[in-house]
Image: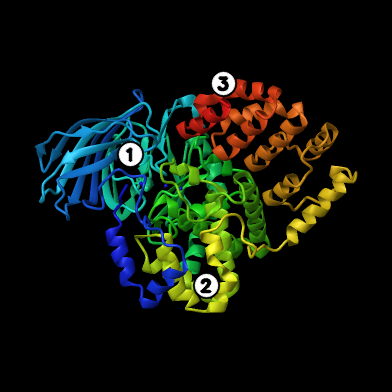
């Protein structure tokens, strides 16, 4: 989802090699950032010392809530540097050896967001650096769950969330999106539990508690992932399947039954899936985000389990990352839109192929609404509404707004509309193929776009107004809008309700989650309690098992003081850890003194259910 200098030289060379003079000249059309490709969020010197391969040997102690072991890095000291610098965060370094010989090391004072740089002396011909270490209690990537916080409530559970710069809190590494390496791992866990990684995975628990993993394709540190728990597996087809706790496997496998078809659909659009298997791990409720595109094994929130497969576009999004993000990666977190904007676009093309254009149009329209709301929140002149971000000196998670996702995807939709799919789809497929397993900057992408799609068409370039999109604030005037066929019918039914038609008489029987969201989103800011009661009686919103609808309904309940929903809302907040739902709900509560008291009471009660990243953002909210 994000550091000082980065391993950019090889990327720049490879990019320059495939760009002709015309593309070089085209870069003059766009603002030139002298720091483009320089990662402000890593303290490593991976631009001087190439990180080639990681051999990880760790043990997971569920009782002490600690990972310990050794990370052995195969390096290429191409610049004959005298030291290797790596990123760490709340790690204790027990020992360091270079080419089998113990060496002294030092850790800098911790810098906010970035952690502590680890300094290791090396020589010109050094090739192997072994670091033995253990994690601390403030490891931002790790959530340790007691049995009570899992679905089945029988065994503890651990999972990681390494994006954006959290891999450094469980592995000493060069933690930047533009730094790729392969890895092997040996992971020891309590017997009876299963370990999974972003790699080739086992499909059943073994007798020893020792699991071996291999990732032969180079990936950046933010895609390092580990999960340990009482986990079972069920196949979907020959190359896809689902992992989850045993008590969830029936629901999860039914909900994700179309994942194999998704992979086939994605391949038909933009080229072969390059990662072997594609499996999904449905995590316990505390997972702070919707999904994480860990290669070979997407980590997913259980909030997508709605019973009707209406929320699985999230899986299409994470699958699409197998091309945009995992295969072709943003060089720095300033270029984050190159991951998420492309992925949002790809997700909606997958859903269009599988569900039809009118279905995808609903996703586009809801996304546009999110974009409008986010720009309003940030301010339409805010630097944070550019596609090309400026995150220097800031937590890269500050860039995790709807801007890179929705402004980015709408920019690609504009390109598609202006040149036609017969040109745009081959362009995008060629882009993924020619940049496979490489990183790319915003400036390099614009040069590639100019050379391979726009090709000097002055009228087209003027029509697109690319600078307004990439290097300008707000929503450009030429932002495309999706069709409104299905939502127009929803809007008509809402108007009927607001004019007095009883809810049971509305035509809603064929609605999906997306229609219900449109129905509720466009309601007046504050309905009457009587109106809320009528809607609830007809549609059972307070008791819904659909997390998207529930979150929106509870926000409406707070605004209208519809107390009938408050007990269910508290239950929801006790069992859901996804920040997308937590932050709006708590944020709505704290707008009034009465609501703030309720928010603080509920948060204090359930804070430990939430991931450390969710705790950080909610702690700030509650302190205001």
Camera-side residue: 463 or 256?
A: 463
Camera-side residue: 302 or 12?
A: 12
Q: Check the image and name the residue furthest to the right.
A: 500
Q: Are marks 1 and 3 in contact (CB under 8 Å)?
A: no
Occupied quadrant, residue 422: bottom right
Disc assigned to residue 424: 2
Disc assigned to residue 41: none
Q: Are marks 2 and 1 in contact (CB under 8 Å)?
A: no
Mark 2 or mark 3, earlier in chain: 2
Left or right: where does residue 599 sit relative to residue 467? right
List x then y, in percent, for residue 438: 34, 60
Camera-side residue: 553 or 400?
A: 400
Occupied quadrant, residue 172: top left
Mark 1 or mark 3, earlier in chain: 1
| Quarter of the rendering occupied by the C terminus | top right
The residue where tag 3 is placed is 605
Does the rendering let one see residue 350?
no
Mark 2 or mark 1, earlier in chain: 1
Q: Are marks 2 and 3 in contact (CB under 8 Å)?
A: no
* Residue located 63% across and 33% down the image: 587
List x then y, in percent, for residue 415: 56, 69
Secondary structure of the residue carrying numbered label 2:
helix
Left or right: where does residue 551 sit relative to residue 278? right
Disc assigned to residue 168: 1
State how the image is colored: rainbow
Does the rendering let one see residue 617?
yes
């Amino acid at each position: 989802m994000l550091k000082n200098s980065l391993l950019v030289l090889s990327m720049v060379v490879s990019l320059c090699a495939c760009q002709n003079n015309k593309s070089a000249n085209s870069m003059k059309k766009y603002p030139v950032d002298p720091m483009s490709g320089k990662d402000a969020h890593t303290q490593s010197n991976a631009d001087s010392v190439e990180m080639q391969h990681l051999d990880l040997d760790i043990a997971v102690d569920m009782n002490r809530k600690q990972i310990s072991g050794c990370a052995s890095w195969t390096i290429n000291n191409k610049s004959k540097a005298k030291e290797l610098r790596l990123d760490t965060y709340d790690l204790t370094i027990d020992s360091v050896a270079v080419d089998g010989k113990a060496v002294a090391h030092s850790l800098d004072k911790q810098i906010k967001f970035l952690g502590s740089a680890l300094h290791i002396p090396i020589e010109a011909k050094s090739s192997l650096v072994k670091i033995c270490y253990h994690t601390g209690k403030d490891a931002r990537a790790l959530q340790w769950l007691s049995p009570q916080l899992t679905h089945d409530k029988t065994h503890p559970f651990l999972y990681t969330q390494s994006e954006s710069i959290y891999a450094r809190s469980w592995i000493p590494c060069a933690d930047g999106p533009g730094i790729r390496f392969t890895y092997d791992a040996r992971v020891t866990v309590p017997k009876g539990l299963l370990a999974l990684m972003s790699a080739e995975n086992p499909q059943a628990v073994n007798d020893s508690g020792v699991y071996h993993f291999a990732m032969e394709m180079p990936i950046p540190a933010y895609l390092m992932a580990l999960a340990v728990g009482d986990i079972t597996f069920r196949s979907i087809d020959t190359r896809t399947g689902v992992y989850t706790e045993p008590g969830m496997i029936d629901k999860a496998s039914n909900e994700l039954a179309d994942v194999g078809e998704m992979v086939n659909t994605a391949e038909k659009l933009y080229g072969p899936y390059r990662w072997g298997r594609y499996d999904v791990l449905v995590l316990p409720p505390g997972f702070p985000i919707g999904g994480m595109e860990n290669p070979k094994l997407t980590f997913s929130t259980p909030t997508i389990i709605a019973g009707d497969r209406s929320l699985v576009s999230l899986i299409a999004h994470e699958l699409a990352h197998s091309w945009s993000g995992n295969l072709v990666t943003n060089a720095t977190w300033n270029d984050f839109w190159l991951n998420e904007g492309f992925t949002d676009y790809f997700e909606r093309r997958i859903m269009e192929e599988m569900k039809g254009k009118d279905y995808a149009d609903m996703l586009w329209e809801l996304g546009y609404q999110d974009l409008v709301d986010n720009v309003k929140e940030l301010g339409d002149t805010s630097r944070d509404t550019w596609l090309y971000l400026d995150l220097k000196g800031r937590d890269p998670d500050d860039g995790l707004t709807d801007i890179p996702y929705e402004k980015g995807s709408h920019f690609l939709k504009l390109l598609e509309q202006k040149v036609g799919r017969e040109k745009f789809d081959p362009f995008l497929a060629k882009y993924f193929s020619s940049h496979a397993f490489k990183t790319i900057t915003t400036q390099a992408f614009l040069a590639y776009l100019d050379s391979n799609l726009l090709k000097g068409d002055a009228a087209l370039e003027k029509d697109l107004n690319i600078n307004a999109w990439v290097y300008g604030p707000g929503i450009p005037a030429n932002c495309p809008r999706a069709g409104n066929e299905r939502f127009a019918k929803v809007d008509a039914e809402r108007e009927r309700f607001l004019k007095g038609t009883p809810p049971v008489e509305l035509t809603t029987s064929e609605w999906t989650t997306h229609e219900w969201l449109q129905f509720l989103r466009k309601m007046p800011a504050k309905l009457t309690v009587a109106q809320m009661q009528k809607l609830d009686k007809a549609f059972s919103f307070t008791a819904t098992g659909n997390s998207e609808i529930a979150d929106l309904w509870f926000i409406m309940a707070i605004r209208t003081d519809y107390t009938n929903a408050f007990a269910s809302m508290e239950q929801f907040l006790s069992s859901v850890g996804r920040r997308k739902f937590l932050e709006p709900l708590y944020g709505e509560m704290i707008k009034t003194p009465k609501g703030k008291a309720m928010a603080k009471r509920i948060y204090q009660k359930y804070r430990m259910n939430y991931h450390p990243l969710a705790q950080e953002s909610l702690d700030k909210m509650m302190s205001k």
